[in-house]
Image (tube, grey):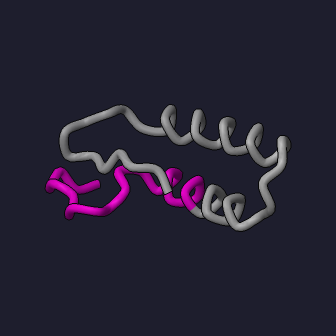
């Protein structure tokens, strides 16, 4: 694992890339109560995936 700073716009954790993809797919679906519940769950997972660090990109989807 490299100790070099990440390039701007790159995710800090590979797991977060998968969550971002899931969020994008979910947002392409019709708005429903179930979609809202799933979205909140995915955002909570996304936020818990990596510690917040100055060099870590922290914008969802």
Q: Is residue 28 magenta?
A: no
The count of marks equals 0
Question: Which residue is painted at 46% across and 56% down in the image?
Answer: 14
Instruction: Give residue 8's position: percent from left, percent from top.
Output: 21, 61
Question: Which residue is painted at 70% across and 67% down in the image?
Answer: 28
Up-down relation of residue 30 to residue 38 (above or below): below
44 vs 27, nearest the viewer: 27
Question: How would you classify the magenta stretch by its main secondary structure?
Answer: loop
29 vs 60, nearest the viewer: 29
39 vs 17, nearest the viewer: 39
Q: Quadrant of residue 31?
A: bottom right
Can you name the residue that lies furthest to the left here?
A: 4
Question: Which residue is painted at 61% across and 63% down in the image?
Answer: 24
**Position of the N terminus by quadrant:** bottom left
In the drawing, does residue 20 fall left or right of residue 40?
left
Instruction: Give residue 57's position: percent from left, percent from top.
Output: 31, 50
Question: Which residue is painted at 58% across and 40% down in the image?
Answer: 43
Instruction: Give residue 19's position: percent from left, percent from top.
Output: 59, 53
Q: Quadrant of residue 6?
A: bottom left
In the drawing, does residue 39 fall left or right of residue 49?
right
Magenta stretch, residue numbers: 1-20
Instruction: Give residue 15's position: percent from left, percent from top.
Output: 53, 52
């Amino acid at each position: 694992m490299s100790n070099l700073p990440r390039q701007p716009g790159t995710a800090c954790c590979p797991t977060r890339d998968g969550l971002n993809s899931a969020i994008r797919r979910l947002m392409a679906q019709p708005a429903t109560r179930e979609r809202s519940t799933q979205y909140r769950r995915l955002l909570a997972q996304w936020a818990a995936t990596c510690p917040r660090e100055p060099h870590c990109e922290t914008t969802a989807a």
